[in-house]
Image (spheres, grey):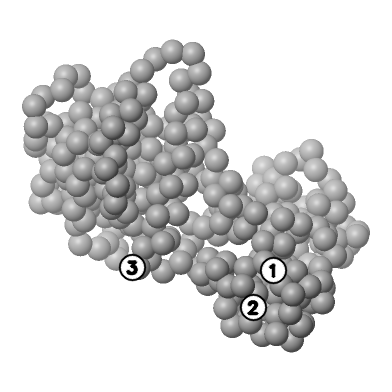
Amino acid sequence: MDPFDDLLRGIRAEGAVFGRSVLAPPWALRFTDRAALTLCIPLRGEGWLVEEGEGAGAPRHIRQGVAAIVRGPRPFVLTDDPGSAARPEALRDIRCADAAPPGDPAGSTVLLAGAYRVRSEASLRLLRVLPPVALVPDDHDCNALYDYLGAHFVADGPGRQTVLDRLLDWLLVCTLRDWFDRPEACPPAWYRALGDDVVGPVLRAMHERPAHPWTLAALAAEAGVSRTTMAARFTARVGEPPLAYLTQWRMDLAADLLADPAHTVAAVARRVGYADAFGFSSAFKRVRGTSPSEHRAAAS
């Protein structure tokens, strides 16, 4: 288990919103889901992705198989002509779940789009390091895969929603992992540090056992080095001391647990490595600026 595993597990789909659109030129779709994350993949054809609002970048060309990850919640436009995005009369507001137009005209674009709302605090850590738009080219021959995906998104039958949810899980995981491995990506420091022979084992140990009573000596033992070496290497690679990183991770986990009223504050404290609710509450308020009870009330 490592930080990337934990953050990806937090964006597991339940009730995924997916749509498959068959489009003939001219077309200009304005996505209004206001989702935290939207995944768009032309299964056939190509188009342009146009951001809206202040700070919007230049239109991005997306061809068949290129996955576009769009960080919300601002609306954005997918179109065959980027000039259409500036003409309100040319736009059609759409949500990912909207029904696709009938037919399959020759030369059309087949677009797969999925919207996802992220509620997990752990997953928000991942979204915060993503750019507004990330394009992930297909470096493999995936034509057969696209045909398979396209067939499942129009097929009916028992368990259809579960199939869509799990396909979304798989698509997001693969696309995000491929993005962070690309040279133009700016992954968080901890992602690059996973490959370090000292810091990597320490990060994995923290994420596997967040409730363990970790000390600098215990973490150094995981890496097989001295406390001084481990602390210096961790701080240099991750950008903060190991125990500060651990506290932040524990508080993110606690924030998610507190959102479930079935967990008492004392139970949450034990789950994230605190012996009593008082010490946990003090740490939570220091790190997040609000008490556990206030956070729970806001989450509900």
Relative horizontal placement of residue 205, taking residue 8 as reference (left or right): right
Name the foreground residue: 155 vs 282: 155
- The spot of residue 210 in percent (x, y) is 76, 59
Can residue 31 be seen from the camera position used here? no
Residue for point 65% across, 54% down: 1
Q: Are marks 2 and 1 in contact (CB under 8 Å)?
A: yes
Vertical comparison of 296 with 284: above or below? above
Vertical comparison of 130 with 150: above or below? below
Looking at numbered disc 1 in the image, what kind of residue is underneath it? Val
Q: Earlier in the sequence, mark 1 or mark 3?
A: 3
Label 3 vs label 2: CA separation?
24 Å
Vertical comparison of 44 with 183: above or below? above
The crowd level at tag 2 (other Cα within 10 Å; few <14, some 14-19, many 20+) is many
Can residue 40 be seen from the camera position used here? yes
Name the residue that disc number 2 marks: 234
In the rendered image, the quadrant that contains the C terminus is: top right
Looking at numbered disc 3 in the image, what kind of residue is underneath it? Glu
Label 1 vs label 3: CA separation?
27 Å
Q: Are marks 3 and 2 in contact (CB under 8 Å)?
A: no
Q: Dividing the picture into quarters, in which one does residue 147 lie?
A: top left
In this view, the mark in front (1 or 3): 1
Name the foreground residue: 62 vs 52: 62
Name the residue that disc number 3 marks: 184
